[in-house]
Image: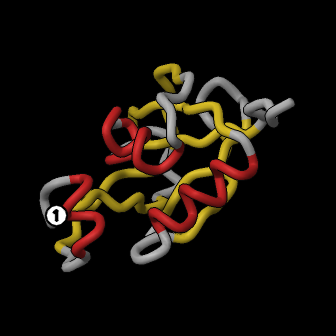
Amino acid sequence: MSEQPDQLLFTYGSLQDAEVQLDTFGRLVVSQPATLPGYTIDYIEIDNARLSDVAGPSVHPVLRHTGNALDKVVGTVVHVTSEELDAADEFEAALYRRARVRLANGREAWVYVG
């Protein structure tokens, strides 16, 4: 029996894309709209062939914590397994680190921050 998705991952960029999900997880993952309060998005230019080949442009969003309740990032929560979370870590490792956050609905999720 395969592992059931028990991890929540908030995504605001390329991991929302079906092609990226298929490449990273081997499947399309269950997702719902979500909001992350206290953050804004900045953009950085990168030179990473794998990300550019799969995700497209070389300018990528990066979360910035502001602590201001008026700031928010709208994205998607995806349901993944621990193994898929490890795959996401490999996909995002060049630019981001994974952190725990509390979403607007009170649920905790992982997110990649710069």
In the picture as drawn, the residue positioned furthest to the left comes out as: 57
Q: Where is residue 90 in the image (x, y as percent from the top left)?
A: 53, 67
For the point 52% across and 23% down, the residue is 31
Please name the residue that numbered disc 1 is placed on: 59
Instruction: Choose between 25 and 109: the one closer to the eye.
Output: 25
Tally the numbered discs: 1
- Which residue occupies the foreground of this view, 44 or 66? 44
In the rendered view of the protein, which quadrant contains the N terminus?
Answer: top right
Asked if residue 55 is positioned above or below residue 103 in the image, the reply reads: below
Q: Residue at x 60, y 42 (%)?
A: 9
Q: Position of residue 54 (x, y in %)?
A: 25, 55
Report if residue 93 is visible in the image. yes
Answer with left or right where residue 4 lies relative to residue 11.
right
Three-letter code for the amino acid on which mark 1 is drawn? Val
Disc 1 crowd rating (10 Å Cα; few below 14, some 14-19, many 20+) is few
Its colouring scheme is: secondary structure
Q: Quadrant of the C terminus?
A: bottom left
